[in-house]
Image (spheres, rainbow, N blue to C red):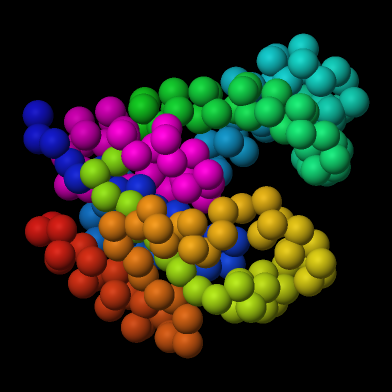
Amino acid sequence: MHKPLRLGLTGGIGSGKSTVASFLADAGAAVLDADAISRSLTQVGGRAIPALLAQFGETMITPEGALNRDAMRSLVFTNPDSKRQLESIIHPLVSLVLQEQAQTAIQQGAPCLVFDVPLLVEGIERWRPQVDKICVVDCTPETQIQRVMARSQLSRPEIERIMSQQATRQQRIACADVVILNDGIDLTQLQTKVREMWASFGL
């Protein structure tokens, strides 16, 4: 069984991380998306729902049986204990599904496993041993705000509040083996940067 490169991919909200992940998938990588897994765990019938119901009660579950995201978001923003309780349920399940997906990708011969993790730097002690390289998609905070405002209904204060919960730009760059600066460039130029990184890994 060959050993694929394990690449941790991260970046703040609006950095363009998901676009970089799609370019890596086009190049032949298996992209394992922690956010998508987390959402699937909290949808109707998701693996996390029984534990969430037991911990937080019916007010945090929709009538259909999914996590009530708005109610939970309000709770964890005002209650650090609730945030820790939520993470203690979600994080181990995300890790388990990521391992399952990684094994499948290895068996299918993927040359590179991309662990697409928005909060990788916030959990660096957990993630550093699990990846060979860390790629940070970087841009200025103002660029982040403008991109998110353009694609969503969120206001500047709401976006700034989300950003304040994430690692700083400096903290992310300090953890990076590779930085892709996605500021003031178009998609073609971004794709070229991704291809150059791919080639630098010998892939």
Residue at image position (69%, 57%) is: 164
130 to the left or right of 40: left
Nearer to us in this view, 2 or 56: 56
11 to 43, vertically: above or below = below
Question: Is residue 97 rendered to the left or right of residue 7?
Answer: right
Residue in the foreground of this view, choosing between 174 and 26 = 174
Residue in view at x 29 percent, y 69 percent: 194
Quarter of the figure that contains the N terminus: top left
Q: Which residues are magenta?
A: 102-130
Residue 74 horizontal side relative to residue 22, left or right: right
**Above or below for 80 versus 142:** above
Residue occupying image coordinates x 42% and y 32%? 126
Res. 44 visible in picture? no
Against 142, residue 27 (above or below) is above
Frontmost residue, 144 versus 36: 144
Q: Quadrant of residue 79?
A: top right
Residue farthest to the right, as pictured:
59
Whether the magenta-drawn stretch holds residue 154 is answered as no
Residue 113 is situated, as x and y percent measured from the top left of the image, at 28, 44
**Residue 86: which quarter of the image?**
top right
In the picture provided, is 116 more to the left or to the right than 151?
A: left
In this view of the protein, can residue 128 be seen by the observer?
yes
Quarter holding the C terminus? bottom left
Residue at 63% in and 29% down:
87
- Expressed as whole percent of the image width and height from the top left, the position of residue 116 reads 43, 48
Q: Position of residue 11 (x, y in %)?
A: 49, 59
